[in-house]
């Protein structure tokens, strides 16, 4: 069996021809797409592959990629595959120390640095990284240090490859022909909510299986679809999804700045996009706010449209039932005159397929988006399973679940209701971590996910909690903080939440408000403030947030409800150690950094 990724670019060139768009860069400043066809993509991969061979890259060696999303890192990945080498992604937001840890752990020979920030970070620690022989700078504007005699720009790499000898080209071809499914395709380093990150070994066989499984499951997709790539390509969700899209011939639009994704989506106008729930929580909050400001006929129209959309899409289409003719006629009217305009405002006029995973997304938001005609596909997966374990099927999905397992993946519920996984997409193990591997797998070879869940009566997988996050109050009650945090995430005035309560007598929370929305509210209600500190300490603001929290907690057991909370005037950040590179809360860090604020809530 050949490796899908090793030969993907050439195969697609043969299939589609040179001029067909493979991917585009979203030019945010000029509001346009800069397209690259399969011909130029293939030529660039060949040049970089040859250049790396000339510079001394050997088969099975590691190449670190420390960059924001850009076409060059996609090209670099496939150039590594042609050499039977291993690209290892590092989040662009990583600190110098975090980057050095991964570079040293993988013993990377080369490091692609995307922008000046990544170049500066690597230069800070380069003396501590003995395996590295060269930095390759993607951004042409990077000015190398005076004492840096080894770094080169990506453009020079292309020039070097273009001038490669026939012997070099033959060697790259030999390596490509020798590739096997057992070769390592990449190491995905876990974000490390506790302790140092570990590199999950994903082989080409893992990606072969993942692409084939998704091809069978995702039958609503075709090579006429386009996908916006905005999650970091160092995240397994985006990496595996982008590889799948390219393998299907879908056009990929690369968003280079995650914080400008709202702009990027409107420029790309894609029919698909994988994302984490926070993106959709913000969309939901913004739409709800807009609806709340409507009056008269406009308000009536949107409410009726959503009611008809919910009935048609959730009660009939979701279950594979024939839609009654009158309901279908009403839906078409409201879709044309109301819902399509709403989707246009978001930037997804041709909405087709939007997978989301990585954290819980409330059923309220899922139902709302489907009512709008946005096909949100909730799924579940991990770095260690080459992303997807389960996701909504096209028909018969259960809202509140994370869908059914992909064909070829097995799930078993173990002790403490832990979800165990087995299948061809499960990692080989953690790189150079025999002790961790012993903990990660059961004696009979099932991978321990660390997540608790159950399989419901329809065969859908339902997540209940993250076992590492689960805590118990001093009254002996178990609390799943993520479930509470996802509820509060629906609110437009709440940006981030950390639920507290381990071995405490009740549950509390540290809350980061959505500052702009809160300032608008304060101004509208004549609440004076001179700083965010003033605002979060204002009694009227605290009362306002408390009322919203109480509404959001409706239906929770008394012991699960947040009794007290602290509003902070600044957001949690990766730089301060409060968040992982995948934007998950580092609970031990929160407990340490805000120990005084937490203690005050229990006085």
Image: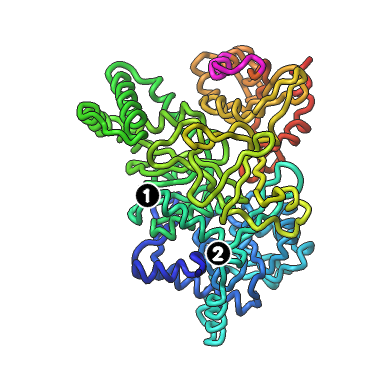
Q: Position of residue 64 (x, y in %)?
A: 65, 62
Among the 4 quarters of the image, the one containing residue 341: top left
Residue at the image position 52 percent from the left and 24 percent from the top: 491
Q: Position of residue 367 (x, y in %)?
A: 42, 29
Q: Nearer the viewer, mark 2 or mark 1?
A: 1
Return the mark for residue 515.
none
Magenta portion: prevailing SS class: helix
Residue beneath disc 2? 77
Return the mark for residue 219.
1
Among the 4 quarters of the image, the one containing residue 175: bottom right
Q: Is residue 116 visible?
A: no
Residue at the image position 58 percent from the left and 34 percent from the top: 454
Q: Are marks 2 and 1 in contact (CB under 8 Å)?
A: no
**C-alpha separation, residue under disc 2 versus residue under disc 1:** 27 Å
Residue at the image position 79 percent from the left and 62 percent from the top: 128
First in sequence: mark 2 vs mark 1: 2
Among the 4 quarters of the image, the one containing residue 107: bottom right
Q: Position of residue 28 (x, y in %)?
A: 45, 49
Q: Is residue 546 left or right of residue 40?
A: right
Camera-side residue of 464 and 246: 464
- Farthest front residue? 444
Camera-side residue of 305 and 48: 305
Magenta segment: 547-559
């Amino acid at each position: 069996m050949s490796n899908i990724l090793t030969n993907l670019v050439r195969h697609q060139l043969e299939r589609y021809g040179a001029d067909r768009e493979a991917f585009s860069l979203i030019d945010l400043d000029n509001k346009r797409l800069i397209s690259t066809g399969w011909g130029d993509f293939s030529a660039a991969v060949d040049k970089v592959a040859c250049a790396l061979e000339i510079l001394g890259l050997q088969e099975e060696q590691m190449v670190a990629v420390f960059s924001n999303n850009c076409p060059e890192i996609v090209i670099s990945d496939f150039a590594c595959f042609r050499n039977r080498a291993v690209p290892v992604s590092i989040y662009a937001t990583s600190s110098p120390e975090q980057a050095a840890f991964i570079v040293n752990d993988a013993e990377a020979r080369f490091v692609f640095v995307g922008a000046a920030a990544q170049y500066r970070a690597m230069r800070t620690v380069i003396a501590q990284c003995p395996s590295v022989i060269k930095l390759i700078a993607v951004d042409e504007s990077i000015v190398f240090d005076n004492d840096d005699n080894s770094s080169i720009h990506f453009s020079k790499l292309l020039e070097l490859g273009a001038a490669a000898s026939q012997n070099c080209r033959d060697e790259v071809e030999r390596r490509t022909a020798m590739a096997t499914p057992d070769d390592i395709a990449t190491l995905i380093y876990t974000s490390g909510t506790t302790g140092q990150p570990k590199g999950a070994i994903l082989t080409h066989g893992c990606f072969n299986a993942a692409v084939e499984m998704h091809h069978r499951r995702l039958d609503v997709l075709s090579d006429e679809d386009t996908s916006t790539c905005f999650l970091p390509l160092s995240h397994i969700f985006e990496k595996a999804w982008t590889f799948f899209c390219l393998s299907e011939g879908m056009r990929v639009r690369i968003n280079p700045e995650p914080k400008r994704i709202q702009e990027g989506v409107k420029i790309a106008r894609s029919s698909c996009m994988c994302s984490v729930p926070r993106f959709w929580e913000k969309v939901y909050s913004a739409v709800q706010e807009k609806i709340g400001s409507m009056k008269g006929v406009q308000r009536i129209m949107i409410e009726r449209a959503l009611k008809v959309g919910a009935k048609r899409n959730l009660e009939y289409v979701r279950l594979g039932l024939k839609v009654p003719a009158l309901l279908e006629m009403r839906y078409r009217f409201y879709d044309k005159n109301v819902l399509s305009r709403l989707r246009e405002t978001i930037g997804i006029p041709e909405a087709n397929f939007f997978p989301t995973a990585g954290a819980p997304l409330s059923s309220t938001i899922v139902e709302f988006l489907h009512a709008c005609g946005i096909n949100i596909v909730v799924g579940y997966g991990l770095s260690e399973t080459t992303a997807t374990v389960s996701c909504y099927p096209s028909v018969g999905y259960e809202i509140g679940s994370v869908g059914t397992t992909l064909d070829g993946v097995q799930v078993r519920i173990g002790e403490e209701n832990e979800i165990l996984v087995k299948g061809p997409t499960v990692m080989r193990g953690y790189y150079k971590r025999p002790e961790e591997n012993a903990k990660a797998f059961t004696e009979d070879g099932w991978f321990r996910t660390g997540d608790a869940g159950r399989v419901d009566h329809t065969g859908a997988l339902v997540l209940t909690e993250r076992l590492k996050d689960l805590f118990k109050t001093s009254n002996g009650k178990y609390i799943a903080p993520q479930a509470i945090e996802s509820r509060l995430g629906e609110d437009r005035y709440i940006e981030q939440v950390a639920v507290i309560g381990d071995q405490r007598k009740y549950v509390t929370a540290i809350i980061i408000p959505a500052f702009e929305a809160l300032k608008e509210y304060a101004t509208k209600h004549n609440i004076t403030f001179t700083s965010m500190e003033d605002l979060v300490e204002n009694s009227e603001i605290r009362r306002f947030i408390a009322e919203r929290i109480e509404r959001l907690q409706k239906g929770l057991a008394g012991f699960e409800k947040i009794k007290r909370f602290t509003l902070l005037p600044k957001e949690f950040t990766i730089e301060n150690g409060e968040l992982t590179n995948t934007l998950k809360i580092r609970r031990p860090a929160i407990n340490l950094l805000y120990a005084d604020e937490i203690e005050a809530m229990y006085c």
